[in-house]
Image (tube, coloured by chain):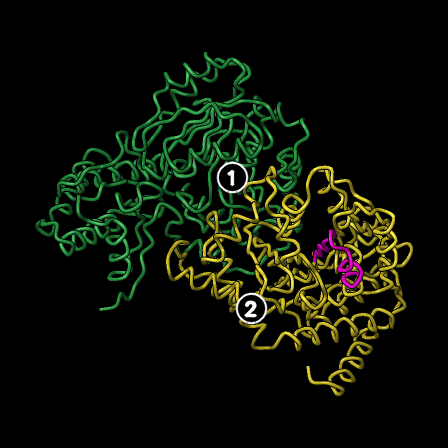
Chain colours: A yellow, B green
Amino acid sequence: MKPIKTRLLTPGPTMVPERVLQAMAAHTLYHRSPEFKAIFSETIERLKRFFHTERDTLILTASGTGAMESAVANLFAPGDSAVVVVGGKFGKRWKELCESYDVRPITIEVEWGKAVKPQEIKKALEENPDAKGVLVQICETSTGVYNDVKAIGEITSNYEDVILVADGITAFGVYDIPVDDWKIDVAITGSQKALMTPPGLAIISLNEKAKKRLERKRNTYYFDLAKEIKNQARGQTAYTPAVNLIVGLNEALKMIEEEKLENVAKRHQILATCAREGIKAIGLEILSEVPANGVTAVKVPEHIDGQKLVAWIREKFGIVIAGGQEHLKGKIFRLSHMGYVDIFDLLTELEAVEFALTRMGYRIEYGTSVKAAMDTFIKAVHKRPV
Amino acid sequence: MKPIKTRLLTPGPTMVPERVLQAMAAHTLYHRSPEFKAIFSETIERLKRFFHTERDTLILTASGTGAMESAVANLFAPGDSAVVVVGGKFGKRWKELCESYDVRPITIEVEWGKAVKPQEIKKALEENPDAKGVLVQICETSTGVYNDVKAIGEITSNYEDVILVADGITAFGVYDIPVDDWKIDVAITGSQKALMTPPGLAIISLNEKAKKRLERKRNTYYFDLAKEIKNQARGQTAYTPAVNLIVGLNEALKMIEEEKLENVAKRHQILATCAREGIKAIGLEILSEVPANGVTAVKVPEHIDGQKLVAWIREKFGIVIAGGQEHLKGKIFRLSHMGYVDIFDLLTELEAVEFALTRMGYRIEYGTSVKAAMDTFIKAVHKRPV
């Protein structure tokens, strides 16, 4: 039997609500028209509420990596050094970006699956008084690890010359994070994760401490943040933006406001707990010591090829989950419960995994993970409304 | 009376066909799935046919400026020099990009509205034997000028160490340009012009002469062309691309293939001629000495404020045409006839201009430009099928 439906359940891109797709399907607006400027400014205001901030918040037409590059290129000078947490593929990307811009990375290597200890960051900053920043992932998507960025902010805020740059591409909207209170100087996210919009937009929000660094001239043009700040304050962008995606993002943010961000975050927390309980019930192990609420990385039982498992689920059932990256290829699979996802989507993922494991020789009773997830869900919902 | 419809007739973004909007409204695909890889590779193959080439042709998630930056950042080294044609806002962008990357611009200043003489480029290359490239617009969108890039290619191809980088953002698809035959080493375009897709994608196609330069290490990451060449050959992108926009672009390219690119180019040529004849019939002057086929820049009669004219047409009739940029602000308006545009769209633009001019005290008989455009159209169509 060929699958007749596709279900996108990767940790990005994620499922896009019909409302957002429909909004994007409206005719393209002229990016310099009053009509678009109004929508653009409205979207920026919604993003500021989403981050609980009044600071400059910018939309770039690029993938999240573009916003990461803009932070490194605009906020650090050649010869600067920065503490970089490398505990997965995206931590490695921070390091590579630093190297591209002649910023010396002071690397804290963290075993893939573990979270960075805030004390290690403090130690690195003490040992490297010249360090100009800390670059970290709030959620390291490749391992499903949550880093305690709030505790890190408490540390970095004590250093006058250190900015905390947090890649929250799979964290903002999964968690309700007030960037000012948490002392995140530079917050980054992307459209295609908890923001429920197709890929193509990156968001960067930066406070005065970070903005002070914008005066230096750097080898960057498209990602020139000073120029964007000037333009976006007037409802404009320096270059033609992805108009239709922005209209979609505005609609998605409207949905988040309707559900209320705190409820969105609770939903993610409950679904993540259900995922973990479901997985444990069938005897599998979660990779992450501190699992994040947007994605659950699961170790594949020995003798089973994780890449085959993921491919089989996709080909047989049209359910698209992610495998492992780099040295974790074949060793893990990743269940996403990020964005436009409810309990039944999660149960579907668990069911597909049960089918696949059984097929590949790992013996379980069908429904075991589902029962555990449902039990967990109903208990959580009874305690607090979803 | 408030307008009940909006008609997007700017030189970018341009109107997007319903077929493309519908294609984009399909659920987002996982960018690493076989399904998306197949669509991506198909889109790349269509783009190669569009450029009449087999060379590497890449899609970047960015506005056209991103592709321009990628060319400067990847193909020139700090300290290099390059001949830059500056005859409008986008020529200035080339110059600024060079300066951002420590490439010395050898500027050929061209009066806004005039085309560069290929002989001037030859002279500049002779006088600057160290020059490593020529950066030019095929159509300078801010003035509606067409530069004879074919003649320029005949010159640059004689220099072993010079590459011709052509910004054809408002030229490709307006004209049928075989990049190999015309000796354009690097061709750049964007999704939101004659490609009839919303903004957010940039395209860059480069030949072996240009690719030889990719080995140098530069301060660039998101726009690393060597990395993209490696990835895109396998139907992948280095970073999450704007999936839905690519699905839309594939559909738009399908439409261009159905109409046939040579007919698309003829349609643009005929509509451009109609626009020019219509404008002349009401006594207005075209800015460009060598007018391009995608956009017609028209001088506003004295004592009339071009910005007000454009605003009035938009507010009164919902028709969005563009005004002038920089020192041409208020001095010109620009009629677009690029992409998904037919004769009736062009006549609509002329009618709106007639209404506005009359309202602002410039006396004409209604229908004068329309008659001239219709006469021109029917003669052109009789001579050759549109």
From this viewpoint, which residue is outermost toward the bottom? A382
Relative image position of residue A305 (x, y in whole percent):
84, 52
Magenta-colored span: A152-167
Q: Label 2 vs label 1: CA separation?
A: 30 Å
Q: Secondary structure at mark 1?
A: strand
Q: Is residue B382 above or below residue B333?
A: above
- Residue A293 seen from this side: yes
Q: Which residue is mark 1?
A: B203
- Residue A299 seen from this side: no
Q: Chain of mark 1?
A: B
The label shown at residue B183 is none
Quadrant where the N terminus of chain A sits is bottom right
State the image quarter where residue A30 is shown: bottom left
State the image quarter where residue A282 is shown: bottom right
Position of A284 with respect to B362 (left or right) is: right
| Label 1 Cα crowd, 10 Å radius (few <14 / some 14-19 / many 20+) | many
Depth-wise, is mark 2 or mark 1 nearer the camera? 2
Q: Are marks 2 and 1 in contact (CB under 8 Å)?
A: no
Question: What amino acid type should be assigned to the residue bearing mark 1?
Answer: Ile
Position of B1 with respect to A251 (left or right) is: left
The foreground one among B153 and A106 is A106
Q: Which residue is mark 2?
A: A253
Relative image position of residue A166 (x, y in whole percent):
71, 57
Relative image position of residue B136 (x, y in whole percent):
43, 29
